[in-house]
């Protein structure tokens, strides 16, 4: 047993053990900030942000500084221009697990670090094929699966970011109309870019012609996987669906407005169908198998709180 533990690829920490790594760093977010940054049904507390995400921000700041030092050494070696290359952090995990909250909290903490880095956040939703294209390909019921994304466009975006290119456009996704909009936001050479999405650690299929193939994970400097039991994810998804039915879905412009007009029983029936037929298969077939590729795994319990942390050994 002892030998197996020594060979394990991850350091394993309880919440209490991990919290000690804040090493006296002062919390720069207030309780109001944490409340503002959390998503609809993610009840993250100020204490959890302080105990889990503050030490993580400290670790990441050290990693960023080390990578920047390596970059400066390399540019001196080649005699090249010292063009800034962003440090890219990926946040992956199931629907309803709390990826967006993790990404937002990290962005806020890292941007307030002593060195005041510029930190941007992008979600992979904008790289979904438009609904018209998904309909054409028969993929509307597989939205969120790897094949529903414009992989080439996403890889091109990451390549532009990693090359230090300025003014890189990112397509915008509207959760209200459930489609990609004909507009973009611009990412302009940040120090750190956080990319949040379901399948960012997914390698995809290898080409049969032997040609080299790039994966999104090839561009990530650090990756985080938010983990939880299936039964908890199902409960959180249904809870979020019910809350959205009472809020966002009530807007007549919402793609899902019809659910606000249904009875609670009818709406729940669809919610359970969506989990069992779309989100659960995607989790089992595409998302969960990538967990072991992450540099950090944050494991949540049924209360939605993080219970333990696993950090890949250097």
Image (cartoon, rainbow, N blue to C red):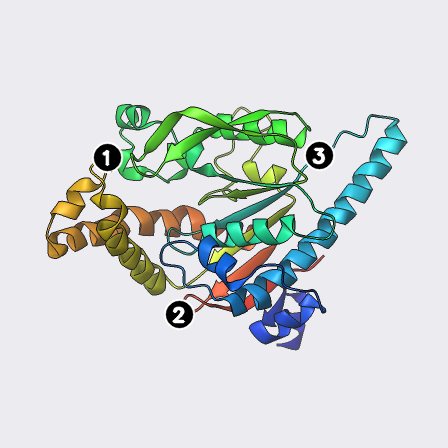
- Asked which secondary structure carries label 3, the reply is loop
* Residue in the foreground of this view, choosing between 154 and 24: 24
Which mark is nearer the camera, 1 or 3? 1
Residue 62 visible in the displayed image: yes
The residue that label 3 is drawn on is 85
Q: Please tell me which residue is depicted at 74% across the width and 33% down the height of the picture.
A: 84
The residue that label 1 is drawn on is 253
Task: For marks 1 and 3, give the CA distance.
Answer: 40 Å
In the picture, measured across the screen, residue 140 lies left or right of residue 163, that is left
When the figure is inspected, residue 187 is found, relative to residue 120, above or below; the finding is above
Q: Are marks 2 and 3 in contact (CB under 8 Å)?
A: no
Classed neighbour count for the residue bearing mark 2: other residues with Cα under 10 Å, few (<14), some (14–19), many (≥20): few
Q: Quadrant of the C terminus?
A: bottom right
The residue that label 2 is drawn on is 303
**In the image, residue 245 lies at what x, y percent?**
22, 50
Classed neighbour count for the residue bearing mark 3: other residues with Cα under 10 Å, few (<14), some (14–19), many (≥20): some
Q: Quadrant of residue 160?
A: top right
């Amino acid at each position: 047993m002892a030998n197996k533990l020594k060979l394990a690829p991850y350091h394993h920490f309880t919440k209490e053990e991990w919290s000690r790594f804040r090493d006296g760093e002062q919390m720069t977010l207030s309780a109001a900030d944490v409340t503002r940054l959390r998503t609809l049904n993610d009840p993250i507390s100020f204490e959890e942000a302080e105990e889990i995400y503050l030490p993580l921000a400290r670790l990441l700041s050290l990693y960023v500084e080390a990578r920047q030092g390596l970059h400066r050494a390399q540019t001196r070696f080649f005699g090249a221009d010292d063009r800034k290359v962003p440090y890219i952090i990926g946040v992956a995990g199931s629907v309803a697990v709390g990826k967006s909250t993790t990404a937002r909290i990290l962005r806020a903490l890292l941007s307030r670090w002593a060195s005041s880095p510029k930190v941007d956040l992008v979600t992979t939703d904008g790289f979904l094929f438009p609904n018209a294209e998904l309909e054409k390909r028969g993929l509307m019921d597989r939205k969120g699966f790897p094949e529903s994304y414009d992989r080439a466009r996403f890889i091109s975006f990451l390549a532009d970011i990693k090359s230090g290119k300025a003014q890189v456009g990112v397509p915008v996704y509207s959760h209200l109309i459930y489609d990609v909009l004909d507009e973009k936001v611009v990412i302009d050479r940040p120090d750190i870019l956080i990319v949040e999405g379901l399948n960012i650690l997914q390698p995809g299929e290898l080409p049969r012609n032997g040609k080299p193939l790039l994966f999104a994970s090839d561009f990530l400097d650090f990756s985080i996987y938010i983990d939880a039991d299936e039964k908890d994810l199902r409960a959180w998804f249904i809870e979020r669906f019910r809350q959205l039915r009472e809020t966002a879905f009530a807007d007549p412009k919402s793609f899902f407005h019809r659910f606000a007009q249904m009875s609670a029983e009818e709406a729940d029936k669809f919610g359970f169908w969506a989990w069992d037929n779309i989100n659960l298969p995607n989790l089992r077939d595409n998302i969960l198998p990538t967990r072991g590729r992450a540099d950090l795994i944050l494991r949540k319990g049924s209360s939605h709180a993080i219970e333990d942390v696993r950090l890949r050994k250097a």
